[in-house]
Amino acid sequence: MADISSDASSTAIDVRPLARRPMLEISGVSKSFGATQVLCDVSLSVAPGEVVVVIGPSGSGKTTLLRCINLLEDYEEGTITVDGAPIGYRRRGSERIRMSERDIAAARATIGMVFQSFNLFPHMTVLRNIAAAPVRVKGAPRETAEARARELLAMVGLSDKAAEHPARLSGGQQQRVAIARALAMDPKIMLFDEVTSALDPELVGEVLAAMQQLAQGGMTMVVVTHEMSFARDIADRIVFIDGGVIVEQGKPDEILFAPRTNRVRAFLKRYNDRYRI
């Protein structure tokens, strides 16, 4: 796999001291499905280049939070901004106004998201899967988009798969193509939703390696995962969510080795053998 860390990380070092606002700002976000409240007054700030890993039990609101950031799920209260630009709603005094669909689409284009399922177009080659969105959404020339797609394939270690169709790839390879496809839109932030959960154990490492390379290159990332060793290695901060609220957050060692709350300690009991908690 090509090493992108040196050039990208040097850019990040130059940019971060100048940053005056978070890359992601979530303020008082609440979301319900019918009578069930899934998120309750959630607030979270993510700095440029920061990697935040979100953990918690199934049904705690982790995936819903990611989907609200990208407005794949609407949210009833609060605001979300990416690099200062609102996502979904603007504030006019105390009034909360929904943005136009055109503005929402433009804001969403700044956010890359990779899902549990690969969602690749089966009738397109790997190269076309990656180049399609920049051509269709941004109006990029096809030659430019395909050249960028080849660069991204090299980055995720799949230069030799450009002409293949997804069905001929392993699950780990398909997920790396999905990462490259999200990066082709030059997002300001990347969201990852349990991207290894559908993979055989022997394929998990290659996907996590691609994500770790992004982190080392300075990409702002919010990662929902159950891979605790990966969370420990990649995260600048771990956030524990349960019942739609942030219970605890802190540096990886603080959360994984010395959690402050009984709820987090109980959740991490299953990892006792590995972490000796």
Image (cartoon, helix red, strand yellow):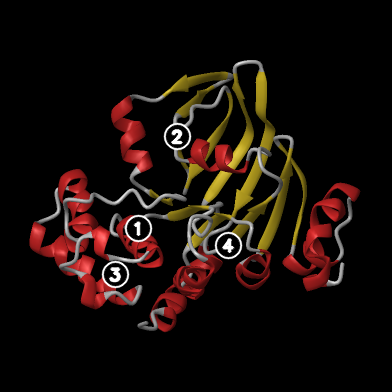
Residue 269 location, x and y as percent? 84, 58
SS assignment at label 3: helix
Q: What element carries label 1?
A: helix
Q: In this view, does 58 lie to the left or right of 21?
A: right
On the rendered image, what quadrant is the C terminus found in?
A: bottom right
Q: Pointer 3: residues within 10 angstroms few (<14), some, or many (20+)? A: many
Q: Residue 177's quadrant in the figure?
A: bottom left
Asked which quadrant contains residue 151, the reply is bottom left
Badge 1 amino acid: Ala
Mark in front: 3 vs 4: 3
Camera-side residue of 174 and 90:
174
Q: Residue 71 carries which label?
A: 2
Q: For the point 54% across and 53% down, which residue is it?
A: 194
Q: What residue would you read off at disc 4?
A: 51
Say if mark 3 contacts mark 2, CB within 8 Å.
no
How far apart marks 3 and 2 lie (CA) works out to 26 Å
Disc 1 + disc 3, Cβ < 8 Å: no
- Residue linked to disc 1: 178
Q: What residue type is labelled 4?
A: Val
Check contact, mark 4 vs mark 2: CB within 8 A.
Answer: no
Residue beneath the point at 32% across and 35% down: 105
Disc 2 crowd rating (10 Å Cα; few below 14, some 14-19, many 20+) is: some
In the rendering, which numbered label is found on residue 152?
3
Return the disc, 3 or 2, that comes first in the chain's sequence.
2
Q: Which of 233 and 101 is in front in this view?
A: 233
Q: Residue 80 in the image: x percent, y percent?
A: 53, 37
Q: Which label's residue is closer to the chain start, 1 or 4?
A: 4
Q: Earlier in the sequence, mark 4 or mark 2?
A: 4
Work out whether mark 3 precedes mark 4 in sequence or the reverse, and give the earlier one: 4
Whether tag 1 and tag 4 are in contact, CB under 8 A, the answer is: no
